[in-house]
Amino acid sequence: MTSKVSTAIVLFKKRKKKNGTYPAKLRLTHERKQMYYNIDSKNRIYEFSEDEFEKITAPKPRGEFKEIQLEFSLIEEKAQKVIKMMDDFTFDQFKTHFGITGANMRNVYHYLDIKTKEYKKNGYGDKCGSPMKMYLQEFTKKETNLDFKELTVPKLREFEHFMKHEKGIKQTTYYRYMGSLKSAFLMAQRDKAIPLDLYPFGPDKYIAARAITVKRALKINEIEKIYKYEPIPFTHEDEARDFWLLSYLCNGINMSDLYHLKYHNISKDFITFIRRKTEHSSATQKPILIPITHDIQRILDKWGNTDKSPNNYVFSLLYEGLTMKEEKYKIGWRVRKFNVHMGKIAKKVGIEKHITTYTARHSFATILKRSGISTEFISESLGHKDVKMTETYLDSFENEQKKEIAKHLTSF
C-alpha cells in the first residue's frame, strides 16, 4: 500500500526567468522527499511573478486568475488519479505516467505514447507505437481515449480486416504493429491498471500471424564465388566482402553485434557474445560460442584495432561516449555501404540474387540445414530463443527442396 503522497503547485524559485517570472511546477512530497514536475502543455506555459501567483492562489481569485486556479486544481486531480493507481509509489513511475493522454491508465493510447517515447529515446524513431495509435484512432473513431476493454477478440479481428483490406498494410508490418499493442496490454497489467483476463492475445483468443517472408539464402557454390573473389586490397569492396564473409562464418552474426564486439569477447579459440537484441529480454542468457577458424582470424587481424585491450572495440567504427541513436546511425550507414558493394560483387561473379549483409545470416542457417544439421543446433547457433523463429529462416530452403523433388515426378 502506497504511503501518503501530497501534491501542490508552487513557484519554482530556483529558476528565475529574465523577465522576473518563475515556472510553476507540480510538487510531490513522499516520505519527506520532494520532486518537482513540469506542468506546461503545448497550449499553456505556466510562468508567473510572485505577485501574480499570490492572486492565483488567493481564496477568491478573479478573472483570468480564477481560470488558472481551476486549471491547477485539474492538474492536481490528475496527479492524484495516477498516484492512486500505483500500488508502490515511486517518483520515476509517476513521471512516466503523468501528463500522457490525460493520465488515464486504462487508456490504450497512454501506453502506446509511453512506448513511442521509449523508441525515440533509444534512437529508433516512432517505430510502431505512434502508427498503431493513428490507425486505432481511425478505426475506432476515438481520438483521445480508448479503453482496453474495448479491444476484444472480435474487435481485433475487425481491426485486422481494416488494416489489411482498407489500409493495405502488409502482414509483416501488421505483425510489428500488433507487437506494440501487446506491449501496451502487458504494461497496463504490470501497473495493475487492467485485470489479467482482459488480455486478448494467445491460444483460443486472438493471434496475429507472423508473416514468413521470402528468404534469399545463397547456395554453397554462390558463397564459393564470393569467397574466391579477389578485390583490390583495403578498398571498400574488399572490406564489404570480408565483413560479409565474417558474418557468414560467425554463425550469421548481425552487424550490430559484430561492431559491438570487444576484445574481452575473443579468446584464443572462441568468440563469445550475447545478442544485443535479446540481452534484456530474459533472466538467463545463453552466450553464442563461435570457434575461430583460419578465415575468421585473418579478417580479425586485417580489420581489427591494433589496441587489443579487453574493453576496446574489435573494429574501429564505435567508441565510448556514443548514444544509442549515434551507434545505430553509424552501423546503419556502414551496412548500407556494404550492401552497395556486395551488389557490385554479385554482378561481377555472376550471382543474380540481391545480396545484403542479412543474406549472410540466412545463408549460414540454410547451408547448415542442407548439410543435415538439426534445426535445434542451428537455432542455438543463431541465438534464437524459439525454434519456430529458426524455422522461418529455413522455409525458403524447404520450398526450394520441394520444387526439386517435384521435378523427379516427370524425370522421364
Image: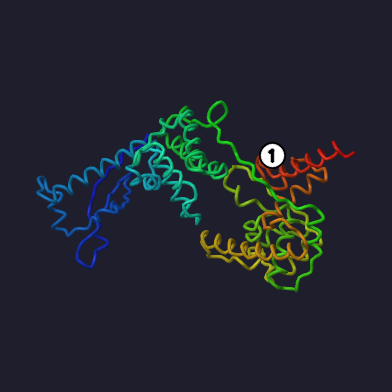
Q: Image check: 283 left or right of 376?
A: left
Q: How is the image coloured?
A: rainbow
From the top left corner, tell me how far across and down residue 120 is, in percent. Answer: 46, 54
Residue identified by numbered label 1: 387
Locate the C terminus and report the quarter of the image it occupies.
top right
From the top left corner, tell me how far across and down residue 50 is, in percent. Answer: 16, 58
The residue at the far top in this view is 204
Q: Image check: 82 left or right of 155?
A: left
The residue at the far right in this view is 412
Around disc 1, counting alpha carbons within 10 Å, would you say few (fewer than 14), some (14 to 19), or many (20 or more)? some
At x 11% / y 45%, what residue is drawn? 59
At x 65% / y 62%, what residue is drawn? 339
From the top left corner, tell me how far across and down residue 358 is, in percent. Answer: 67, 54
Locate the N terminus and report the quarter of the image it occupies.
top left
From the top left corner, tell me how far across and down residue 390 is, in percent. Answer: 69, 42
> In this rendering, is residue 182 above or below 279?
above
Residue 191 position by quadrant: top left
Provide the secondary structure element on which disc 1 rests. helix
Residue 293 position by quadrant: bottom right
Count of numbered labels shown in the rendering? 1
Residue 174 or residue 246, whichever sits in front: 174
> In this rendering, is residue 315 above or below 166?
below
Query: Type of residue at label 1?
Result: Val
At x 75% / y 47%, what residue is drawn? 366
